[in-house]
Amino acid sequence: MIEVRLPKIMKENSRLKKQAGFVLTIELILIITILVIGSFVGIAAVRNALFEQKVKQQDRTVLVLDSNSQVLGEVINFDEHDAPQLFFIDRTSTGSSTNYRALIGVRDDRFTSREPIYYTELNCQGPPCIKPTSAETLDNTGISRLPNTGSVSYFQALQGAPNYAIGRSPNGLPGFLYKETFEACPMLEIIGGIGSPIGSRYISQKVLTGEPCESPFILPTSLGQPALTCQASEVDISINNVTDNLLEKKIKLGICDAGCGTNTQLQCSCPSGYYSVADGSVDGQCCPTGTNYDDPSFCSGLSLKKAESVININHPTQNALEQFTPPFQVNLPVLGGRVDGDQWYNTAPKGEGNN
């Protein structure tokens, strides 16, 4: 006879359900321990690597600061005198949506540039002037006063930008930043109405105490450049507009060079930075401002361009470098690894400069 004990079986199943759960074993405990400890070790290793990388980056990154610890920028190069060089970005260009860079050197008491600034007066006084980019034929005399030795920067020429240079500041040093304009350098008139080529040159790369002003200095001149022909002849024409009213409109004809501009009447005229030659014998000839018109059809003068101060975009009445005061300095490497310290820093044998 088979005895059925259903109530007892159901009771056992109910007790097993109450005991259901996660069963811990020695193997599982070991796995969890290894994972947790390994994670902590990995986090510590990553942290140490990031810290070491940050320290090395701070050691290798050289910043230039002024006397008020205001950062001028990060050093990108050093010149032949071991002076740090950095980029200044000019965001004040008018008539163009392009920003340009200027390469500036910084010494402990002044700013420097490869290009000089010229002055039509002695002792670096008067309106500043500058050469066009890559103008070796005008002036290639370096700080040694020997020809073919310098005073020409090719960086601005590679940008297709106006030329930049450091010129005299009101107190002589540390210098202001100037850039090239379209106007010709104004030539001062002396007795007889003829301009004098004697002036001065501010060449900031000179190694000396005080202002790097060369005075007197024979300003660079050329034989002349052809005058622009901006001769317009007016023709009256009538055009019917949508209201059938007659409008009188003038169009420009005649000889109009590519560099010519237009006036308010849409007639061909001299461009900005040029003046109209009106001596009764010519018509429609234009020469750069500051030059003289010499027959036949040549404009003679300094061949320099007028330079203007690069303004501070936050303070338009100031020069871009006016806010920085000497003496200038650079940041130092971070502390640690000193010979008198108690920490040892490994230097990988990857060559000089990689420590």
Image (tube, grey):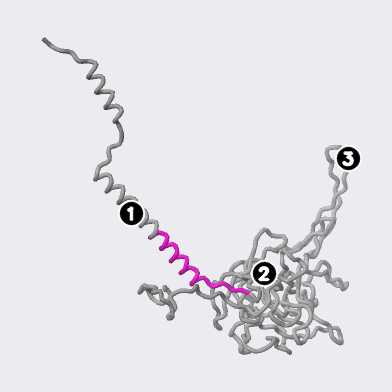
Q: Is residue 346 visible?
A: yes
Q: Going from the N terminus, do you reach mark 1 or mark 2 first?
A: 1
Q: Earlier in the sequence, mark 3 or mark 1?
A: 1
Q: Position of residue 52 (x, y in %)?
A: 43, 66
Give the vertical position of 14 relative to 233 (above or below): above
Q: Earlier in the sequence, mark 2 or mark 3?
A: 2
Q: Is residue 82 above or below residue 21?
A: below
Q: Mark 1 sits on what residue? A: 38
Q: Position of residue 301 (x, y in %)?
A: 76, 79
Main SS of the magenta part reads helix
Q: Amino acid at mark 2?
A: Pro
Closer to viewer: mark 3 or mark 1: 1
With 120 as the anchor, is 36 left or right in this view? Answer: left
Q: Give the side of residue 26 with respect to residue 330, left or right.
A: left
Q: Nearer the viewer, mark 2 or mark 3?
A: 2
Mark-to-mark CA distance, 2 and 3: 47 Å
Q: Secondary structure at mark 3?
A: loop
Residue drawn at point x = 62 percent, y = 78 percent: 328
Residue receiving disc 2: 162
At a point 66% along the width and 83% down the height, the residue shown is 203
Which percent across, then down, holds residue 354?
42, 73
269 w.r.t. 142: above or below: above
- Which amino acid type corresponds to the residue marked 3 in the rendered image? Asn
